[in-house]
Amino acid sequence: MNSSKDILIIGGGIIGLSLAVELKLRGASVAVLTADSKQPTARAAAGMLAPQAERIPPSPMLDLCLQSRALYPAWVEQLEDITGLKTGYWRSGILAPVCQNEPQEKPLLSNLNYQWLDGDTVRQHQFGLGQEVIGGWWYPDDAQVDNRALFRTLQTATKELQIEIIQGNAGEIIRQGNRVVGIETTSGKLQADRYVVAAGAWSEQLLNVPVFPRKGQMLSVCVPEDCGVIQPLQTVLFGTGIYIVPRQDGRIIIGATSENVDFTPGNTPAGIQSLLAGSIKLYPELQNYPILEFWWGFRPATPDELPILGASAWENLTWATGHYRNGILLAPVTAKLLADLMWEQKLDPLLAAFHYSRFPESGKFENGK
Ligand code: GLY
């Protein structure tokens, strides 16, 4: 590849592919560098679109998340039209059960749609909740998408749109003055007019940006055939340190730990035990369901847990990283705002809150490890 490409995106995860598709649809020529050896965080997530259940406080981050949640229906419809595939988007709502001895804190935002359900009402809402559940907050506008199906859909969309995907690991980002002039990779040196770092938890290895891995372990079970229904859970259950995400095909995703263990791979007995105990407490019937799979992923965390979006210290390099717990949710709005910025020179004022310069080391980033 040479500088005939307008934009090279470093990172083929949910953010990189969403941005590539958006830019291509607007007329840009785009390539994506993707590393085979790094499991994309998109695969590891549960796909909750949950700004309210996650209790993001009133802030530009909440505005960004709400904007993205609102973009989701039309965004997935467009991807489904391009590919003929389904993403499993489901406006299932999210129920946040409250157990005995847990605080019943009211959500901070009164202008959003939510409701407190007492012990009887919450059980009418979702049959089979554990005895310790005394009520719950109901967030009807939170939703979910099947993150693996979404990822496959994005991969297929890149093929349909003839976006060049380059397999290889990124090495040194070569700079001259305040411009990036190329990147060394295991597939040779790549050049473009503009570059985007969308390398998730691995971004720091490229440019010493403050993004670090926060590991999440997960597992899935499936509803047994003799249960009488394909899926008895008709909403996401979002508890304290645990969530249970039903899929319409009968799978149930259970997540997730949150561990500062660098890139240590693998599931641990302690991690899985905490997920099993937490989920069975909320929905006891799960203890009888066959286990399908265990896995883990690395969330890209930043010191203030907010993403780093937009301009960098180099005039032709853009950040799209650090989405931490909200990468699946924030994919459409990240793609939209960054395509507006890079392709239309339109700067959304919301991006100011996610500027790299909020970190003291900003502008001094050297190539990472
Ligand atoms: N978005 C949920 C998580 O990161 O575990």
Image: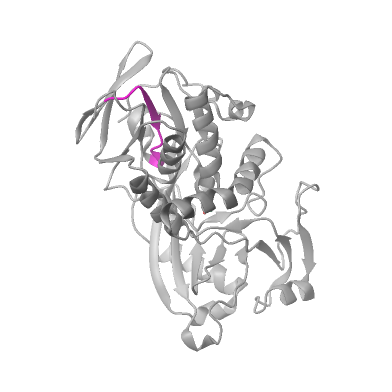
Residue 176 is left or right of residue 297, and the answer is: left
* Closer-to-camera residue (101/141): 141
Q: In which quarter of the image is the C terminus?
A: top left
Q: Which residue is drawn at 24% across and 40% down?
A: 168
Check if residue 20 falls in the magenta segment.
Answer: no
Q: Residue at x 64, y 79 (%)?
A: 128
Name the residue furthest top.
177
Q: Indicate whether 230 appears above or below 276.
A: below
Spot occupied by residue 94 in the image (x, y as percentages of width and height): 65, 61
Q: Residue at x 78, y 67 (%)?
A: 117
- Residue 180 seen by the camera: yes
Q: Quadrant of the N terminus?
A: top left
Q: In which quarter of the image is residue 137?
A: bottom right
How is the structure coloured here? one colour
Task: Give the residues drawn in magenta, as a range.
Answer: 191-201
Residue 70 is left or right of residue 227, and the answer is: right
Q: Residue at x 39, y 55 (%)?
A: 152
